[in-house]
Amino acid sequence: MPPSYALERLLSAGGTKLVAGVDEVGRGAWAGPVAVCAVVTDLSEPPAGLTDSKMLSPARRTGMVAQITGWAAGIGYGEASHEEIDALGMTEALRRAARRALAELPAEPDAVILDGKHDYLGAPWPVRCEIKGDLSCVSVAAASVIAKVRRDAYMASLGFEEYGFADNAGYPSPVHQAALASLGPTEHHRLSWSYLDDLPRWRHLKRHRNPLAGEGQLGLFG
């Protein structure tokens, strides 16, 4: 079932004038920034085939970007760097990236539909968390596509062919894990993450941060 405007219309019926759909990508990657996109629409017919970015092939996602750009009433995109993630934790990094994305919109939204079950954005926006919002909500689906394509393109532009960034976008693929074990982390890796605990040669590079900031991450071998 394709995403619909049911949630946007529900919020509008309650008096909300401008609703932004927001989604993130890169939360589970081991390298690179976390990216957030915000999309507002005029409730017009969305591009055919629009859905969660994970349900689309890379070519289909890339082609969808031009359609979304020509159709959406506003698009904002923001990132938080791997340095910010290491220093502040993932929750605060997501908040910063989301605020940067919302600041790029042509007008400040009155409410935000946030994909997932955790509100990492907070005040001053009223936030509606929607599990699998990228599958059910038009504006969130559009945000998921833009965020995924833009972040993937950035990761591919970094090079580091041994780590396979052009294919894995910094996520822990077998190629990425093998390169880490033999070559160690690059300047784009998140050094506060627990994969370094599984790499004796590189464990000394790990950075420690406030354990209350952000979530724990999976190790390299489990």
Image: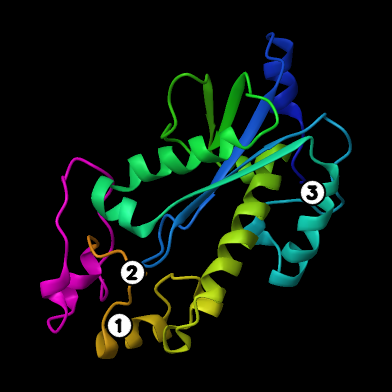
> First in sequence: mark 3 or mark 2?
3
Q: Secondary structure at mark 1?
A: helix
In the picture, measured across the screen, residue 57 lies left or right of residue 189, that is: right
Q: Are marks 1 and 2 in contact (CB under 8 Å)?
A: yes
Identify residue type, mark 3.
Thr
Magenta residues? 194-222
The crowd level at tag 2 (other Cα within 10 Å; few <14, some 14-19, many 20+) is: many
How far, Cα to Cα, is label 1 from label 3? 37 Å
In the image, residue 25 above or below residue 77: below
Residue at 65%, 40% in the rendered image: 140
Q: Position of residue 51 (x, y in %)?
A: 72, 51
Q: Secondary structure at mark 3?
A: helix
In the image, residue 147 above or below residue 113: below
Check disc 1 and report the residue beneath it.
180
Residue 65, which numbered label? Answer: none
Check disc 3 and report the residue beneath it.
69
Identify residue type, mark 1.
Leu
In the picture, measured across the screen, residue 171 lies left or right of residue 23, that is: left
Looking at the picture, tell me which residue is in the foreground, 16 or 97: 97
**In which quadrant will I find the C terminus?**
bottom left
In the image, residue 107 above or below residue 168: above
